[in-house]
Every structure is written in C-alpha cells, then in structure tokens.
C-alpha cells in the first residue's frame, strides 16, 4: 500500500512557499537550549536535563525533512550526538526520582548528585558547544539555501514523510506489537512521528483520536522501559535488590497494559478490509 494512499492528508491553508516559521521555530529552540543549559549549570531546575533533551529532539524533528542539504544536516548530527551522550544520565535521573518516591532518600540523593555533576561536565564538552554553534549558524545557512534553490516542495516532502512514518509504524505493529523485545523500537517510531507532526503543525496534524493514542502508547511504553531498566539495575546493584520484586510486579502489569494499548493503536492505523474503509488519521489545519 502506497503511503500517500494509506493516510490521506487534507490540504493546509498555509502557502507551500512559506518557510519563515522554520527559522522562527529554530530560534525558539535555540533560546530553549540556552535557558536549559543555564538551569543545568546553576542547578536551579531538577527537570532541566529532561527539558534539554526535549529541545534536542525538537531540533532533530524539525530537521528530519531537511537532511538532504548537508549544510542543514550538521546541526542534526550534533544534536543526535548530545542526545546519545545524555541518555544514560536521564535514565539515572529517572531512577533517582523513583527511589525518592519510595523513600530511599540516601540512594536518590547520591544518584541525583552524580547526574547533576555529570551533565554539567557534559555541557562543557566540545559536542555541546558544537550544538550551540550550529544553532547560531543554521538560520543563515537556511536562508542561503532558500534564496538559491526552490524550497516550495518542503511542505509536500514533510507530509509524505508523515504518511510514510505512519505506514511503517503500522507495519511494525502488525509484526511485533505483542513482543516486548520490539517495544523500544516501536516507542522510538511513535516518538519520531509525534514530534515530526508537532514540529510541522502548521502543515500536518494527526487527528485528535490518533494523537491521543500515540501519546498514551508512548507514555505506557516509557513506563515499561523504565521498569525494565530498574530491574536490570537491581540485578547489578546489590543495594537495590530489595526493590526488584516490586518492580517486577509493576513491569508485568505494565506489559499487559502495553499490549492492550498497542493493539488499540494498531486497530486505529489498520485499514479494515471488510469495510474497505480507512480511518482518517490526519485532519485539516486551521489558520
């Protein structure tokens, strides 16, 4: 089934040649990056690392349809590298929050201090400075490309990418929605299509029902992923072993919930052969 047939998109009222919002959004992400980096440096916001990673994902989502231009892809590569380097720190931070919730204050404080120190050091490394430098250079690079080439097809490219992502997500769910081994990959696909739609909300936006299903699936998959990591940490860290049974029980419940939610998401994305009718996943964007 062709992507453009499987998930038809209603046309947006925004002119296809209008790309000024890309620069405005990128500048907004730059401001967010600077703010969260300052919060991390001053240790003034416990969620600053999480916010930093959301900002970096926003940058990557905005750039996904533009990677064919090497001048614009450099920022995407830098953001990806910084996301990778902070992934383990975010996992440790979430574990610290869980330990605090359970009343294990000493263990939580020890891990929180490690995360705060490590992420400050991470933001002083060349990769973080590279992200900031590319954020500053990107608008000028984009304007240069826009003035020297025809970018009127970007809107069509974005919409085609969303359709393809939705089809690929459906195909993966058909094969492995009930297999825990594949859930992390499914979660990444859900995040990819969600963030792409959010970055280009001027042009495409999922139907509310689909958007709610995607958000719910991502949240529940994230919960199951965290519980699995905590169980693994408990196996490696003797001090956490008294908590393993509780995490294992919670993970079993989460896995049942994941299967239910992914089955519902698959049903929404799947074309009913009997009725020969598509569930329209995207709706027009007003304004």
Image (cartoon, grey):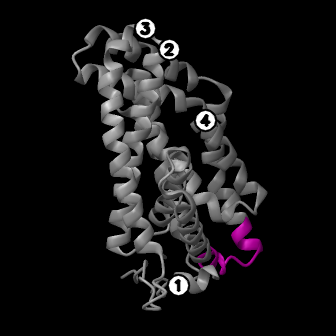
Secondary structure of residue under mark 1: loop
Q: Label for residue 227?
A: none
Which numbered disc, 1 or 3, marks the residue that appears first in the sequence? 1
Distance from Cα at disc 3 to Cα at disc 4: 27 Å
The residue where tag 1 is placed is: 15
Q: Nearer the viewer, mark 1 or mark 2?
A: 2
**Rendered residue at 37%/13% (across/down):** 240
**SS for dot 3:** helix
In magenta segment, residue 5 = no
Distance in Å between CA atoms under marks 4 and 1 = 36 Å
Q: CA distance from mark 3 to mark 2?
A: 6 Å
Q: Nearer the viewer, mark 1 or mark 3?
A: 3
- Nearer to us: label 4 or label 1: 4
Label disc, if present, on residue 84 of the rendered structure:
4
Q: Residues within 10 Å of mark 4 (few under 14, many from 20)?
A: few
> Residue 50 or 111: which is nearer the viewer?
111
Is 236 above or below relative to 125?
above
Q: Give the percent coordinates (x, y) of residue 8.
A: 51, 85
Residue 279 in the image: above or below residue 125: below
Relative image position of residue 107 (x, y in whole percent): 34, 11
Label 4 or label 1, whichever comes before in sequence order: 1
User: Whole-Å distance between the Cαs marked 1 and 2?
Assistant: 55 Å
- Specify start and end residues of the magenta stretch as a single range: 145-157
Secondary structure found at label 4: helix
Badge 2 crowding class, 10 Å Cα cut-off, few under 14, some 14 to 19, many 20 or more, is few
Q: Which residue is the site of mark 2? A: 236
Gap between marks 1 and 3 measured at Cα: 60 Å
Q: Quadrant of residue 105?
A: top left
Q: Nearer the viewer, residue 170 or 74?
A: 170
Q: Which mark is residue 238?
A: 3
What's the magenta bit mostly, secondary-structure-wise? helix
What element does badge 2 sit on? helix
């Amino acid at each position: 089934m062709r992507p453009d047939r499987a998930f038809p998109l209603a046309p947006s009222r925004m002119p296809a040649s209008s790309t000024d919002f890309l620069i405005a959004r990128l500048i907004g992400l730059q401001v967010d990056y600077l703010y969260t980096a300052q919060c991390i440096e001053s240790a003034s916001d416990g969620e600053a690392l999480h916010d930093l990673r959301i900002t970096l994902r926003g940058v990557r989502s905005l750039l996904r349809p533009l990677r064919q231009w090497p001048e614009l892809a450099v920022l995407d590569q830098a953001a990806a590298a910084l996301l990778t380097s902070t992934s383990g720190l975010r996992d440790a931070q979430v574990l610290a929050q869980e330990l605090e919730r359970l009343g294990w204050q000493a263990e939580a404080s020890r891990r929180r201090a490690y995360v705060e120190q490590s992420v400050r050091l991470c933001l002083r490394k060349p990769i973080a400075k590279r992200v900031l430098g590319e954020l500053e250079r990107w608008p000028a690079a984009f304007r240069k490309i826009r003035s020297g080439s025809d970018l009127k097809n970007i809107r069509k490219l974005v919409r085609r990418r969303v359709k393809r992502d939705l089809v690929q997500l459906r195909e993966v769910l058909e094969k492995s929605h009930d297999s825990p081994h594949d859930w992390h990959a499914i979660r990444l696909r859900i995040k990819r299509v969600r963030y792409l739609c959010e970055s280009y909300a001027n042009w495409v936006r999922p139907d509310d029902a689909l958007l709610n299903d995607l958000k719910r699936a991502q949240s529940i998959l994230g919960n199951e992923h965290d519980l699995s990591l905590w169980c693994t940490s408990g196996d490696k860290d003797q001090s956490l072993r008294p908590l393993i049974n509780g995490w294992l029980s919670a993970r079993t419940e989460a896995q049942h919930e994941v299967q239910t939610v992914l089955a519902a998401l698959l049903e929404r994305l799947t074309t009913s052969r009997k009725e020969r009718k598509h569930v329209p996943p995207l709706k027009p964007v007003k304004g």
